[in-house]
Amino acid sequence: MSENDHPLDLTRLPRHVAIIMDGNGRWAQRRGLPRVRGHLAGVESVRAVVQEARRLGISFLTLYAFSEENWQRPRLEIRALMALLRRYLHRELKEMQDNQIALNAIGELDKLPPAVQEDLARTMAATAPGAQMTLNLALSYGGRTEIVRAAQALGREIQAGRLRPEDIDAALFARHLYTGNLPDPDLLIRTSGEYRLSNFLLWQTAYTELYITDTLWPDFREEEFNRAIAAFQQRERRYGLTAEQLAANAGAKER
Ligand code: IPE
Ligand code: IPE
Ligand code: MG
């Protein structure tokens, strides 16, 4: 299917798209290949989707690249994933700079191998100025840990006498998450047909639209991405209101 089958309204794009990139292992296994070959093919999907998101004018793209739980995978697979990440950062630096994409990373980054941490820091510093899109990589990321860390940080501020418990509200809490300066995702895509969050952005997805496709991540390219955005544009985000209230609010805004 071509993009023309799904005309997108470029004035109603999601501001922030988050993706659980799942199915690399199955993609490889179906071809009788080692799992790592699936991760290798998955990198090409990352390149395609990043490029397409930038082309469309999406402001924030968050990719779930490695979860806290993924540390329990076979040592060799973890090593291969870290090597792929480093290679991606080296290879894409110029592309990111040329296309005004800033790299950001969220998660327990100090658990990553030092070489990966250094590459991340270098790439973030080299891509920051004047960016039009933020590519946010979730690495060694766990949603519950993120929430616990925020609670600890707020607890320390109370202990130091800088904050009263009753001053904590949702907005203040959100600012203490790794995503403190990002808007919540408007659209969350999960590939490979699994209907779960797998500890991803638990707080931030409270009102996110979900899009799940059976397509395995290495087969998910710009067309599929456009299809997901088109589906998003068909949704009515009611935030607990009635459809009539929404229509009235939209009318009031136009007047
Ligand atoms: C997603 O693909 C990549 C990571 C979790 C790093 P998987 O490796 O989970 O692939 P499946 O789910 O086993 O097919
Ligand atoms: C989620 O995929 C993590 C990433 C995509 C990085 P998993 O493959 O680890 O999730 P589960 O095990 O199916 O829940
Ligand atoms: Mg998986």
Image (cartoon, helix red, strand yellow):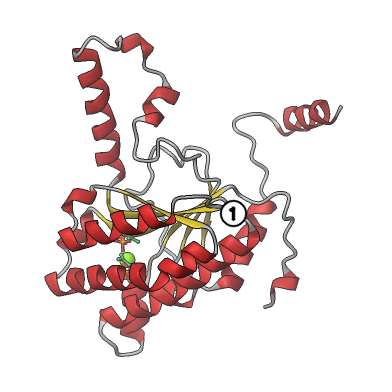
103 displayed left or right of 184: left
Q: For disc 1, does the CB lie below 8 Å from ligand 2? A: no
Q: Position of residue 136 (x, y in %)?
A: 41, 53
Q: Is residue 118 above or below residue 248?
A: below
Question: Which element carries disc 1, helix, strand or loop?
Answer: loop
Residue occupying image coordinates x 23% and y 61%? 116
- Identify which amino acid the numbered label 1 is placed on: Ile
Q: Quadrant of ligand 3?
A: bottom left
Residue occupying image coordinates x 58% and y 61%? 54
197 displayed left or right of 54: left
Residue 228: which quarter of the image?
bottom right
User: In this rendering, does residue 173 appear at all?
Assistant: yes
Residue occupying image coordinates x 79% and y 28%? 253
Residue occupying image coordinates x 70% and y 49%? 12
Quarter of the N terminus within the rendering: bottom right
Q: Is residue 98 above or below residue 9?
A: below
Q: Position of residue 4 (x, y in %)?
A: 75, 72
Q: Is residue 236 above or below residue 70?
A: above
- Of 89 and 35, nearer the camera is 89
Q: Is residue 133 above or below residue 2?
A: above
Please name the residue that numbered disc 1 is placed on.
58
- Badge 1, how many Cα within 10 Å: few under 14, some, many 20+? some
Q: Position of residue 97 (x, y in %)?
A: 48, 62
Quarter of the C terminus within the rendering: top right
User: In this rendering, does residue 113 appear at all?
Assistant: no
